[in-house]
Every structure is written in C-alpha cells, then in structure tokens.
Image (cartoon, helix red, strand yellow):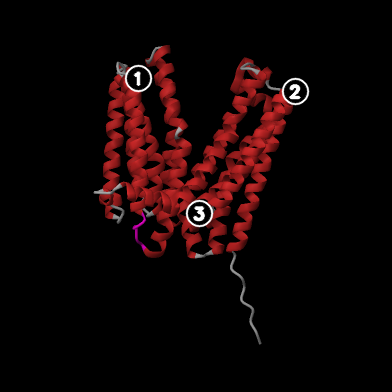
Amino acid sequence: MRRLRDLLGRSGNRFALFHLLNSSLSFALSFGQLFVFVRVLDAHSYGTVVLVTSLSLYLVPLDNALSKAAFVQLREEFLKHKATHGSAVVYRLYAAYAGLLALGVIGFALLFATRLDLVLFLMFCLVANFWHFEVQTLGWAIDQGMAFEKAELFRRSCNFALLALLFVTGWFAAYAAIMLGLSLGCLVWYGRVLGRAGASVAVLRGWRWDDLRAALRDSGRNLSGAAAGSGADVMLMNAPYAIVTACYGAGPPLIVLDTCQKLLRAIVMALRICSEALLPKQSAALHAGDYRRLTRVLGAIAGMSSLPALVVCGTLALMSDRLFGALLGPLASLMPPGTGGVLVVLIAAGLAQNLASSFLSYSGFFGDVLKAAKIAAALMLGLAALTAFGGIEFPTFLRLYAGVFGAVGVITCAWAWLRLRRLRPVPLEVTP
C-alpha cells in the first residue's frame, strides 16, 4: 500500500480518487436510470428508449478506437515537448466523426418526427459517448484529466437530481433536453480548459477536405489497429450471443450465457476503471524510458484489477450455486454443472486479455493489437463453424468458448511481454 501511495503521488492520488468515484457513480447511475425509466415510461416507450440506447452502444467500439488513436497521437508529443501541435490532426478527425453523427441524428429525427423526446435522448447518448471517450482521453493526453473529473462529478450529480425529478414528474422530454444541454455546456467549458493548455479548437477554422485527408493519412495506421482491437473485444464478448441463439435457440442456453457474460463484463469494467486511474503514470513512465517505474505501474494496475476478479472467482469456487441462486432465483436450476469453473476460466482470460490489450493500445503498439484481433476473429469464426456443423452440446460450447477466450488472452499477453522485454534497457558492459 505504501508503494502504491508513493507511485500515485499527490496529484495522481487526487486524479485516481476522483476517477474511481466517478466510475462508481456511473455504476449506480446505470441502475438508477433503469429503476426510474421502467416506472415512468410505458412498455412501448421504454422498448424504444432501449433501442435508442443500443444505437449509441453500437458506436462505442468506434469511439474507443478513435480515443486511443488520439491519445497516442498527442501523448508522446506532449510529454517530450509540452506541445500540442498534433491536436489539429485529432480535432479534424473528431469534427468529421461528429459530422457523421449529426447526419445520423437527422435521419433518426426524420424517422421519428413525432417523438421529440427520443431525438433529444439519442443526441444526449451520442454526446455522452463523445464526452466519455474522445474528450476524456484528449484531456488525459495533455494532463488535464483532473479538470475533466471535476466536470464529470458535477454532471453526474445533476443527472441523479434530474432522475429524481423525472421520477416525480414523468417529464422524459425535459430530462433528455436538460441533460443534453448540460453535456454540451460541459463540452464547451472543457474546450476552453484544453485551449488554455495549448490544444485550442481554433485550429478548425477554415480547414478543408485536404486537411481531413492529411489527418487520416497521419493517423490511419493507428486508427485501423485500434479499430481492429475494439472490434475483436466486441466479437469476443458479443459473438457468442449470435452463435447460441442461432444454434440453441433463445431459451435456457441464452440465459446461461447472459449470466456468465454479465459477470465477465463487470470484471472487465472494473479492470478498465483501475487501468484508467493510472494511465497518465503509465504513459509518462513509458515515454521517459523509465522501465522500472513502468513495470511498477503495470504491476499496480494488475494488482488492483485482480482484486474484484479474485473475489468473484473465490465465490464461484466455493459457492457457485448460491451465487447463481441469488442472481437468477428460480432460474438458477438452468445453470449446467461445472458452469462456475468455466466462468472462472473466462474471468481469468478476460482479465489477462484486457490488461495486455490496454497496455499495447495506450502504448501505441497497434500492430500487435491488429495481430491479436485477427487471431481472435479466426478463432471465433472457427468456433461458430464447429458449433453450427459439429452438433456439439451447449455445455461443450461454453467450455470451447472459454478456451478461445483463454487462447486470445495468452497470445495477447505474450505480445505484451515481448514488448516489455524490448523496452528493458540493455546493461552496459564495462571493458577493462
């Protein structure tokens, strides 16, 4: 614990605490929204809101890829020269992406012309994605993450208050409109913060299509690798739903898979929270060439991330039946024997794969990320073909899926380890 405090330092400690607090509030807010929405909206309206939310979730891999490419684009330049000239490239990519989102919103508005509340809610979801991924990572790259965390704490506090107001009044359109305005206001305010730090949006004035093509050319390789990595993560987590539905139907096997995936997603989310809290320290050590400090940071990330995984895996090993009973109630009997052990393997594999992938992505090793993504896609396609044509039973599929996830985790960890080995300084031989 003392080493961790020394590693964080005062400013790092404040940033980590604020980030962990905001991430915890994010969990609570997701359940709070579910609680309020299902009580305020009728079944048809709530179903449409779920559809709108899913539209924004489908864009998360692209948001994630764009934010990682932007971070790598700016971080090394900022740490070495305290300059942000690369922000012009990033802002042009962001502006083009925002323009595509605007066109999508216009098309959605034409489709649901009579439902202003849904249009406002979609805009709020898309702006929230942009705020959480692209804008937040831009702040991390130029050491302005603390200002973002303060703004995020204010935004989330307002969201809780507006949810309480929505629960009392039932005014969903007003909730969506106020949250949209609040999120846009935070974007404008934080844009000024970034401008004072040297990354001013003024670089967008008068830019032409040639500028956008140049930006794509400069960051295209990183962006394609990051997109492939995000796509592989989505495939590993979501492809089994399609395979199980197509081969086993939407009955008990899908319930079993979804239960396993919910626990796995919770662990992956905890990992992301822990790794992001120390990301500025990790990148600073990497670009300073401080190998010992980098390994300490990565060790701290691995240790922090392993704690929730160990708790869940220990519970599964000792009392999986009770855990499934608490989660599923009368449906717990659907869980096949041995599912707890399979889930332990899945959680361990997910932890390893995400730790290694996060290190490679935020360190700029997108070539390795792309290789791992290709292997993950090939293995998942092979699993789908084997399931469709091999006539295997569902428990066997679940074990094979854990094996695929484990193989991807081992391969990704191997590349991350090799990268770390190459970063280790070579001791100088003293000649007599």
Among numbered discs 2 and 3, the one appearing first in the sequence: 3
* Point 63% across, 55% down: residue: 417
Label 1 sits on what residue type? Leu
- The residues colored magenta run 82-86
Task: Left or right? Give the position of 344 relative to 197.
Answer: right
For label 1, the residue is 111
Q: Nearer the viewer, residue 173 or 25?
A: 173
Helix, strand or loop for disc 3: loop
* Point 36% across, 56% down: residue: 86
Q: Quick check: 277 above or below 398?
A: below
Q: Residues within 10 Å of mark 3 (few under 14, many from 20)?
A: many
Q: Which mark is residue 429?
A: none
Query: How far across and how far down the image is residue 141, in percent?
Result: 40, 53
Q: Residue furthest front?
A: 210
- In three-dimensional space, the C-alpha distance between marks 2 and 1, rounded to whole angstroms, equals 42 Å
Query: How far across and how far down the image is residue 139, in percent?
Result: 37, 49
Q: Residues within 10 Å of mark 2 (few under 14, many from 20)?
A: few
The answer to the question of whether label 2 and label 3 lie on touching residues, with beta carbons closer than 8 A, is: no
Label 2 or label 3, whichever lies nearer to me, is 2
- In three-dimensional space, the C-alpha distance between marks 2 and 3, rounded to whole angstroms, equals 42 Å
Among numbered discs 1 and 3, the one appearing first in the sequence: 1
For label 2, the residue is 391
Label 1 or label 3, whichever lies nearer to me, is 1
Query: How far across and how far down the image is residue 27, in percent?
Result: 46, 32
For label 3, the residue is 364
